[in-house]
């Protein structure tokens, strides 16, 4: 009798699937950042002074239409970092990583007293495109708020992604590349990316930012 019930139950499930057209749900795969109006928000907050930004790029031939869209458009949708836009995304993610409120900036190596203050690094002192000083915006804006689980994932992944320019991990974002990578990881985590996906995208993007360095994984 028990075996008969199990067979009938299984038959009902199969029949339900056939009638309703149900198929196994595939897990979403992370492929691009939901950029949206993040550029607009950073400009409004003064993290990016658009006049300074435009002036800098005027010396490099000016902003392309795609670049302007990242900065001024409020409806960007998903944006993927590519070899073509990697330089612009480096600056945009640098601004985001520096300004978005995060415990890594407030409690991590950047705040170690032996360095004399977070303002003494290339990632902070080097960001001269803000209204006011970079430290006026350091971990000051809640553009993206992570859940405790997402924050834990960012911290775990950031400690294992190194950059060849200064041999520090993303958990210690003392240069522009490190700060930009932190911003990238925060955005990916906020959108539900897995640890594997974060490592994969980070390796790809590091390859764009350091094209002459042989890729040996995220800890190159």
Image (cartoon, helix red, strand yellow):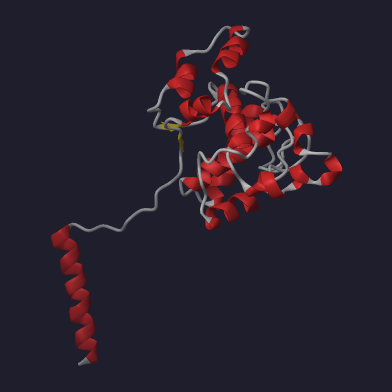
- Pick the quarter of the image with the N terminus: bottom left
On the question of residue 206 being in view, the answer is no
In which quarter of the view is residue 24 placed? bottom left
How many numbered circles are shown?
Answer: 0
Where is residue 203? Give x, y as percent: 62, 39
- Pick the quarter of the image with the C terminus: top right
Name the side, left or right, on which 133 lies relative to 33.
right
Where is residue 175? Give x, y as percent: 73, 32
Could you tell me which residue is drawn at 46 percent across and 45 percent down?
191
Could you tell me which residue is drawn at 74 percent across and 27 percent down?
125
Residue that lies at the very extreme toward the right in this rendered image: 114
On the question of residue 64 being in view, the answer is yes
Could you tell me which residue is drawn at 21 percent across and 81 percent down?
7
Could you tell me which residue is drawn at 60 percent across and 10 percent down?
55
Residue that lies at the very extreme toward the left in this rendered image: 19
* Residue 186 drawn above or below residue 45: below
Judging depth in this view, the residue of 37 and 32 nearest the camera is 37
Name the side, left or right, on which 45 lies relative to 176.
left
Where is residue 84? Give x, y as percent: 53, 21
Where is residue 100? Give x, y as percent: 58, 39
């Amino acid at each position: 009798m028990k075996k008969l019930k199990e067979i009938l139950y299984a038959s009902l499930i199969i029949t339900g699937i056939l009638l309703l057209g149900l198929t196994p749900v595939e897990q979403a795969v992370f492929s691009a950042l939901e950029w949206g109006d993040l550029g607009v928000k950073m400009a409004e907050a003064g993290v990016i002074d658009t006049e300074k930004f435009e002036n800098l790029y005027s010396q490099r031939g000016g902003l392309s239409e795609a670049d302007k869209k990242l900065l001024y458009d409020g409806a960007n949708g998903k944006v993927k970092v590519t070899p073509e836009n990697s330089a612009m995304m480096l600056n945009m993610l640098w601004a985001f990583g520096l300004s978005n409120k995060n415990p890594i900036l407030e409690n991590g190596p950047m705040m170690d007293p032996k360095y004399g203050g977070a303002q003494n690094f290339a990632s902070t002192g080097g960001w001269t495109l803000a209204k006011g000083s970079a430290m006026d915006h350091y971990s000051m804006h809640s553009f993206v708020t992570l859940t405790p689980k997402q924050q834990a994932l960012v911290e775990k992944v950031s400690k294992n992604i190194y950059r060849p320019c200064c041999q520090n991990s993303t958990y210690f974002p003392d240069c522009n590349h490190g700060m930009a990578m932190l911003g990238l990881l925060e955005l990916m985590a906020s959108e539900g990316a897995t640890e594997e996906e974060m490592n994969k995208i980070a390796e790809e993007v590091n390859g764009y930012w350091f094209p002459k360095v042989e890729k040996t994984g995220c800890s190159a």
